[in-house]
Amino acid sequence: MEHAILLVDDEEDIRDVLNVSLIDAGYRVFTAENGKTALDLFHRHHPPVVVSDIKMPGMDGIELLRRIKLESPDTEFIMITGHGDMELAVVSFKDQAADFITKPINIDVLEIALKKVFDKIVGRRQLREYTESLERLVREKTELQSNLAALGLMIGSISHGMKGLLTGLDGGVYLMESGLKRNNLEQVDDGLKTVRLMAERIRKMVLDILYHAKERKLNRENVDVSQFAADTASTIEVKMTEHQIDFVRDFSGSIGYAEIDWESMHSALMNILENAMDACIRDTAKPSHQVIFAVRPEGDTVRFDVTDNGTGMDRETRDRLFTLFFSSKGCKGTGLGLFVSNQIVRQHGGAIAVSSTPGHGSTFTIRVPWIATDNPA
Ligand SMILES: Nc1ncnc2c1ncn2[C@@H]1O[C@H](COP(=O)(O)OP(=O)(O)OP(=O)(O)O)[C@@H](O)[C@H]1O
Ligand SMILES: [Mg+2]
């Protein structure tokens, strides 16, 4: 209600005269003969400006001012004061009246006062809009900056990682070449193994980056959880055996069907299984190592546990696990693994919990609801 005024005065003549003049001046006017009616009208129409007599029987103008300001501090008041009501006028100023005019009312003076008050309202609204758009701009700029910073960090880390992998690749190619020249098939074989390993690492890294780069939507399908667990286990089993790690599958029978994205959940688990394997390989203190992969239903979730008796980790590592690019493996790790795993599990509406004792080993527990909505992770 752009130019509406609530006019309150107990004298009918004043109401009538002012009503006509103000309508002529282009305002929409509601009139009330006492404070109570004024409050009712105010609640119904929310006019931005109230012009009120100070002295009225029953609720006086100051009481009306206080009540309305309490609910609506931005509503502006112009008080009408009689001759010798100076003290009341001062009180009303203290209660945030915008202006006052004295009786007998000069309509020009009232119009000037009204214009000032409406200008004030417009100015305040503009200021609020400017402030809001300024705040939005600052927010956008900050987001952009941190995106750029993350991007820079990412590119730096990727280049660094790639450099290491390419050096490895060169080494493999060199082994193959010199093996071929000398007809040393064993050396060729070693070289080939290195090349394969490096190619696989690069592939994994690129896939991780792609996953991270665009927020993939989940491609949920109805997955037989036992089948899924068995497939995932057999992908890593050979590598575990190669490193003399006892790999235990702790699940059997039918676990049920879950609505999950096979591909992404598979890679989330693979990284956690690879980490468990790495932790065993890096642990030189124990004579033998074991990784247990357990899957079972738990209430309304599917629960996966990956337990290793590898290095375990200290508090600091545990606190930073899921941070992008955090890795304690030097050039052997990119630190993307758990960041991505966590993102995938969260997208499924689930969570990863970690418990670990330095020197003893770790357990990663993943719980995923059987069916969940896609959370933007
Ligand atoms: N089972 C585990 N035992 C001990 N430390 C672990 C385990 N899993 C993760 N960590 C620690 O968490 C870090 C981050 O793991 P993450 O998988 O994110 O990266 P990464 O394995 O170093 O590299 P990649 O990106 O190749 O997976 C690891 O470097 C390691 O320090
Ligand atoms: Mg990893």
Image (cartoon, rainbow, N blue to C red):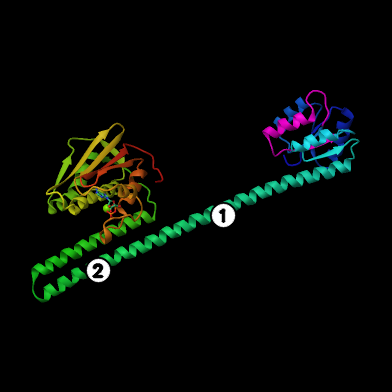
- Tag 1, which secondary structure? helix
The quarter of the picture where the N terminus appears is top right
Residue 208 showing in the rendered view = yes
Disc 1 within 8 angstroms of ligand 1 (CB): no
The numbered mark at residue 292 is none
237 over 12 or under it: above or below: below
* Nearer-the-camera pick, 96 or 206: 96
Identify the residue at image location x=23%, y=63%.
199
Identify the residue at image location x=30%, y=47%.
315
Q: Is residue 168 left or right of residue 6?
A: left
Amino acid at circle 2:
Thr
Of all residues, the one furthest to the top in this rendering is 58
Q: Is the residue under label 2 in contact with that under label 1 (CB below 8 Å)?
A: no
List the residue tagged with mark 2.
167
115 over 152 or under it: above or below: above
Magenta extent: 54-80
Identify the residue at image location x=29%, y=67%.
163
Amino acid at circle 1:
Leu
Q: Is residue 106 left or right of residue 152?
A: right
- Judge the density around disc 2: few (<14), some (14-19), many (≥20) Cα neighbours within 10 Å: few
List the residue tagged with mark 1.
137
- Judge the density around disc 1: few (<14), some (14-19), many (≥20) Cα neighbours within 10 Å: few
